[in-house]
Amino acid sequence: MTTVTVSEDINGDAKAVWDTLSDFAGIQVGGPITSFETTGEGIGMLRTIGMGGGKVIERLDEHDSKAMVFAYSIVNDDSPLPVANYSARVKVSVKGGGTCHVDWTGTFEPKNATVEQASKVVEGIYRGGIARARKAVGG
């Protein structure tokens, strides 16, 4: 298994960052995302993200608002992403002084790609998500 972790500080309220990142139904269509829909609610809910001529179906596996942690996994084998057996965990921590820290870690096996290629794609997704949260809180 390969592990990718992106850890970044954000100048913004931890709860606001948490609210942005943990909104499993909050993905917006645009850029590489061509469609988006959810099925169900809470733990076990699915989100289907259209991209790259295919679909990525993710399941919410954990959601703890008090600890500001959530986890999810990709459940479809025909995902256009270059990963298999993928799962990820996101944690937001209060740093104080109006700042917080985000740790986003994923584990996977590369699929039709080298470890470096798959890792670069995953890292880009994490950095993009954190940048979106940073923009949402003005930090």
Image (cartoon, helix red, strand yellow):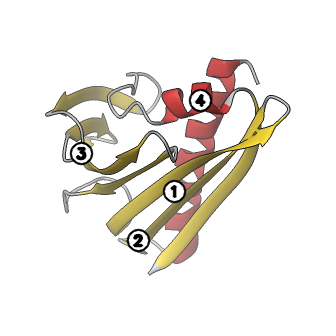
Query: Which residue was labeled with disc 1?
Result: 122
| Labelled disc at residue 26 | none
In the rendered image, the residue lying farthest to the left is 40
**Three-letter code, disc 2:** Phe
Q: Secondary structure at mark 3?
A: loop
137 on left or right of 126:
right
Q: Nearer the viewer, mark 3 or mark 1?
A: 3
Of the two numbered discs 4 and 3 on the same chain, state the one appearing first in sequence.
4
Of the two numbered discs 2 and 3 on the same chain, state the one appearing first in sequence.
3
| Labelled disc at residue 108 | 2
16 on left or right of 66:
right
Q: Secondary structure at mark 1?
A: helix
Q: Are marks 2 and 3 in contact (CB under 8 Å)?
A: no
- From mark 3 to mark 1, how far is it between C-alphas? 23 Å
Query: Which residue was labeled with disc 4?
Result: 15
63 on left or right of 60:
right
Of the two numbered discs 2 and 4 on the same chain, state the one appearing first in sequence.
4
- From mark 2 to mark 4, how far is it between C-alphas? 28 Å
- From mark 4 to mark 3, how far is it between C-alphas? 20 Å
Image point (52%, 43%), residue name:
68
